Amino acid sequence: MGTKHQRFKIDRDFMRALRGTGEYQAFQDSELRGFGVKVTPTGSASYTYRWTKPDGTQGRRTVGYWPAMNPGDAREAAKRESEIIDRKGDTLTVTAVRRAKRTEIAKSALGVPTLRRFLEDSYTAVLRTYCKTAKHGDANARIIMQSFPDLLDEALDTITADRLERCRAAMLARGLAKATTNQKLTALQGLLTHAVDCEILSTHPMQKIGMLPEPSGVVRYLTPEEAKRFYAAMMARENDLRAARDRANDHRRRRGNPLMPCLRDTEFVDALRPAVLVSLMTGLRKSELFNLRWTDIDLVNRIVTVRDEHAKSGKLRRIPINAALYDVVITWKPLAHAESEYVFAGESGEPIQCMKKSFAAVLKAARIESFRWHDMRHTFASWLVQSGVDLNIVRELMGHATLQMTMRYAHFAPNNTLRAVSALQLTGPNIVQIVPTSRLAA
């Protein structure tokens, strides 16, 4: 085997002289740095190219085999590799040039896929792997498919910043909110980033396209008066359902038919009221609530656990169970689906997906307008802040990634800032004297 610094002129005569020695051998070329030959213990020889990667590790790639490829052609192949492989010490400019060359080679060999083909053949699998769940990945793919129909059959390298700006303008013209438009463009941005990583594109067409500024939005929450009307409306709805069940059983009794279970002695007639109460007392997102399992509720230590696969942030969090929530849970458990692992399950045992109709009816009866299910989460946070709970604790309970997200509730505690300022004492030699109003008037 050649020594570390020994180099040889790799030509036909050199290759013909190689023999197997029972051990691996490696020889470096004297003309092209990195080009060499590797010989197996049995004598089979291959041409290789070695280089130092950007992270400092050594890379090696086989560029051909002797005698199928002669040394001159192998050296040219190694030279082409040297022109496109990123190496340690490359400047940003050199890296960009190498990437562009690799992209051109890929284009000439395979062609540039259309947005539709790249999404279906490659990117959807990436989404299913790296999104929180495969279902989230499929949803992201659908956003791209449904939001950019005019681009689906266009080659990726024809999707320019100008075309994307026009797509965004069209979305806004159709009345889409800025936040919704940003969401759609962000989904496409991920696909284009993957195309750049795969060296299908040499530059990112959205590199200079900024996201639209989004309004912070008004936090909608239940006032104490609305909360009373809301709860009264839920109770009235359940009483109506009990009365309807009584009438149905009277009808069945007269005809000798089997009676349905009486609802007079049950605290909850269905899942709506317990689901609303759990939401108001935990701040769970709708998807977190309806995917909640009984194993996620620890009644001994009084903790509700939100699993990371259902949390929007992808991180597990725990929420304490207060006395009122404890009573709701232990009362609802014997009334829930007996064979389902989910706290709020439908007749099939699978999680309930929607309570839109019954929820809307209660809101109408309570004369509450512009209130969504998600606003119960806002209500949970708003009531905590109004009660003087520290914003950082609210952040932990809500599962916010940053405190900035929780700051939207800060204005519900104006007295906190007043108390903080009032705590300052204007004493000491370096404090500017405060002039009384009476002296200023004089």
Image (cartoon, helix red, strand yellow):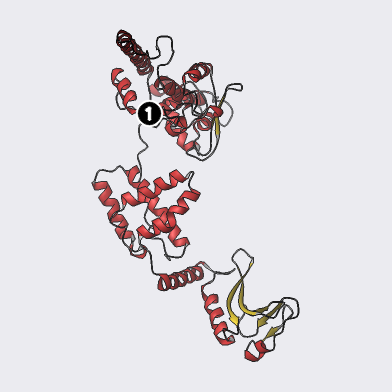
Furthest-front residue in view? Answer: 256
Of residues 165 and 323, the one drawn nearer to the viewer in this rendering: 323
Tell me if residue 24 comes above or below residue 359 in the rendering.
below
In the picture as drawn, the residue positioned furthest to the bottom comes out as 13
Is residue 435 shown to the viewer in this render?
no
Q: Is residue 239 left or right of residue 54?
A: left
> Which structural element holds mark 1?
loop
Count residues near mark 1 (Cα–Cα under 10 Å), then give few for <14, some for 14-19, many for 20+.
some
Whole-percent x, y for residue 19 in the image: 71, 84
Amino acid of disc 1: Trp
Above/below status of 219 relative to 70: above
Q: Quadrant of residue 272?
A: top left
Q: Evaluate whether residue 49 shows in this view.
A: yes
Q: How many marks?
A: 1
Question: Which residue is more in the foreground, 382 or 146?
Answer: 146
Image quarter in which the N terminus is found: bottom right
Q: Who is closer to the viewer here, 35 or 359?
A: 359
Could you tell whether 258 is left or right of 90 in the image? left
Q: Give how far across and how far down residue 430 sits, in percent.
A: 57, 32
- Furthest toward the left, the residue is 173
Is the residue 441 above or below the residue 33 in the image? above
Q: Residue at x 56, y 79 (%)?
A: 78
Q: Residue at x 65, y 85 (%)?
A: 30
Counting from the top left corner in percent of width and height, residue 324 is at 50, 16
Q: Position of residue 216 (x, y in %)?
A: 37, 37
Quadrant, the C terminus: top left
Q: Which residue is mark 1?
A: 373
